[in-house]
Image (tube, helix red, strand yellow):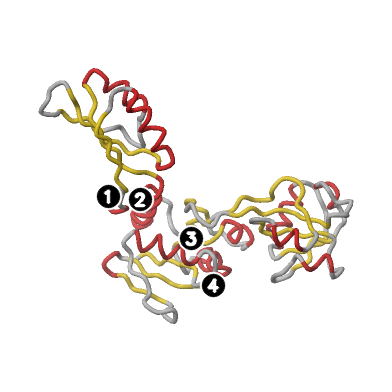
Amino acid sequence: MLRIAVPNKGMLSEPAWTMLGEAGYRLRTNPRQLVVDDGDNDIELFYLRPLDIAVYVGSGTIDVGITGRDLLLNSNTEAHEHMPLGFAGSTFRCAAPNDSPITGLADIQGKRVATSYDKLVGDYLASHGIQAQIIHLEGAVESSVHLGVADLIADVVSTGTTLRNAGLHTFGDPILESEAVLIRSPRLQEDDSRLTIFSRRLQGVLTAHQYVLMDYDIPVSKVSEAVAVAPGFESPTVSPLHDKEWSAVRVMVPKDKVNQLMDRLHDVGARGIIVTALQASRI
């Protein structure tokens, strides 16, 4: 049985639960339930604090888990990133006061950096030959500069509104582009059949979110041209019709390219174009 850690709260939790549900796994029925035994799918779900998931997985107590890439890299564990999951994207950056002379990476030398991600920031600065004092704070690091605790901060940035309200601005390249990831224990082989099945089902959900099915009829003489226009995620399925001069084509195409592809297929002679949402169970 595959033991899986999922976030019990926070920004990662709802999307993670939704993904698991769409993949066909049983979820908890009340917020106090900490463990779900899904014997039908040979898995066991453990609802844990997002900050602790990489620790449990890294120790081998849990086989795999869903957490943020930033939390994984900051965990100082041996857990490995197995696959990105396409949600909870964020950017990790440095920020300094608007009137500060700190405007580049080199300016951090010898300064005080407030962050909740000591290892992540420390490793990044060390990799660039920068020595600085890391000030650990559990949250609200934006206030640290105003209160005189630090010279700058390093934190997750989304819209930047919180930083602007605190009189801060970002500078330099992003420290990290983070998102939700599936991580695995160092004790679990990458080709373990249980992990392969679980990963494929999650990938099926991702594919269902990103692609749609497109069906259309096309003159036999135009099939090659139409397939070149919309080659799809996988090779299109081409079937004969009762009218020998026409073929039916089914292809999986990116959801965000549908309108563009429909126009181009019309131009090469396609008719009766139908777009259908995918179901994860079909992938």
Q: How far is mark 4 from mark 2, CA to CA?
A: 26 Å
Q: How far is mark 1 from mark 3, CA to CA?
A: 29 Å
- Three-letter residue code for mark 4: Arg
- Residue 282 is marked as 1
Q: Which is closer to the viewer, label 1 or label 3?
A: 1
Q: How far is mark 3 from mark 4, CA to CA?
A: 17 Å
The tag earlier along the polypeptide, 1 or 2, is 2
Residue 75 lies, with reference to residue 34, above or below; the image says above
Of residues 148 and 217, the one drawn nearer to the viewer in this rendering = 217
Q: How far is mark 1 from mark 2, CA to CA?
A: 8 Å
- Residue 245 location (% of width, % of height): 16, 21
Asked where in the image residue 110 lies, by quadrant, the reply is bottom right
- Residue 111 is marked as none
Q: Secondary structure at mark 3?
A: loop
29 relative to 171 in the view: left or right? left
- Three-letter residue code for mark 3: Ser
Q: Which residue is mark 2?
A: 204
Q: Which residue is mark 3?
A: 185
- Three-letter residue code for mark 2: Gly
Q: Residues within 10 Å of mark 2 (few under 14, many from 20)?
A: many
* Residue at (52% x, 72% y) in the render: 9
- Residue 142 location (% of width, % of height): 76, 65
